[in-house]
Amino acid sequence: MTKKRARVAGLAAAATAVVLSLAACSGGANAADPSGGAAADAATATSVKDFGSMDALVAAAKKEGNLNIIATPGDWANYQQIFDGFTKKYGITINPSQDSASSQEEIDAAKKLKGQDTAPDTFDIGSSVAVANTQYFAPYKPTGWDDIPADQKESTGLWKVGYYGVMAVGYDANKIKTAPKTFSDLLKPEFKGAVALNGNPTQAAAAAGAVAYADLQNNGTLDDLTPGIDWFSKLKAAGNWNAADGKPNTIASGETPVLLDWSFNQKGYSTSDTIKGGGVNWKYVVLPGTAYVGYYNQAINKDAPHPAAARLWEEYLYSDDAQNAWLKGGAYPARVDAMEKAGTLDTAEFPGKLDKTAVMTDKQATDAGTLLNAKWANAVG
């Protein structure tokens, strides 16, 4: 659940001080048209219309038979359910690799393996890396394109947000009897020695995101995370700071009863048999006010060895089934507003609309990383 914490959009690249071995077979770039018409060029198709129909796209993808994915583990944001749904529906083999790779490592793998059957077909990457590497992407607009907010997609379809994580406060309800309602609550005596982060903010994006979250919750802006660092200094002075690196095993053991982390990680903790087996009743809340989010973008490798399967994968990712699967995994899907309006959203899993969201620009991320490296150790440790 925490393997890819260095891949979070924006802040990840600046806050961190911080191959493939697939068995796929290339299916070629030409997509057969089962209706008997001219063959579509899957490698240049920019929407399902270029195939003539969804049936033609499915036929072309099935002919290829394989899909190479990278840095997308099944226990991340409920991806396993998406894998299972895609394979069951289309019978296409998913070949995963490098589950713990960073966004930049995804791009590096594509460059290294260009022209080989084992190159990645698709990417799941943070915003900074997506914006900086559009030359490696093929434009494609899946069905549901219009439902994706304009600021969450590149206008020609080179990349588009699939889902996003939201910073949240997780806690063991067996120890913390009253859920926190504000950041100020975490300074109260009942949180003595309890509040931890998923890593060090100078090295881990999840932890750096928590500082950004504290900053926004304390009237700061993403131009300057000083209010967030100051808040953690107050947390330490109150005796409520927990220096342990929060992970599933520290939650299960009771070492970190409160943890600031991404919503999809929090959801994974709450459903983990290991954590529940330790007698932990893990819950999490997204506090009112401005929420700090991390976008995860979908893109197709322009040199994908399975170009039709890659495009069918995007069609599936933006379907109601896959979007709801991400929601079940604790992430917010890109089409959430349109699906809620259409009545197709899984309301049982929907935690509710966010008051306001904020995500860092590249400059803000760079400045945040510099500030954290300069001040965090002295302020908090």
Image (cartoon, rainbow, N blue to C red):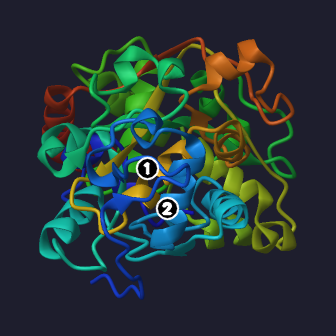
Give the residue drawn at x 81%, y 71%: 273
- The amino acid on which the numbered mark 2 sits, given as a three-letter code, is Ala
Give the residue drawn at x 55%, y 27%: 144
Residue 222 vs residue 279, the one in the foreground: 222
Percent position (x, y) of residue 312? 51, 51
Q: Would you say 187 lies left or right of 359 here?
A: right
Residue 125 vs residue 269, the one in the foreground: 125
Residue 341, compared with residue 243, is above or below; it is above
Q: Would you say 17 lies left or right of 304 here?
A: left
Image quadrant assignment for residue 54: top right
- Do residues under tags 2 and 1 come within 8 Å of each other at their CB atoms? yes
Residue 340, compared with residue 88, is above or below; it is above
For label 1, the SS is helix
Residue hosting label 2: 61
For label 2, the SS is helix
Image quadrant assignment for residue 214: top left
The label number, if any, that marks residue 311 in the structure image = 1
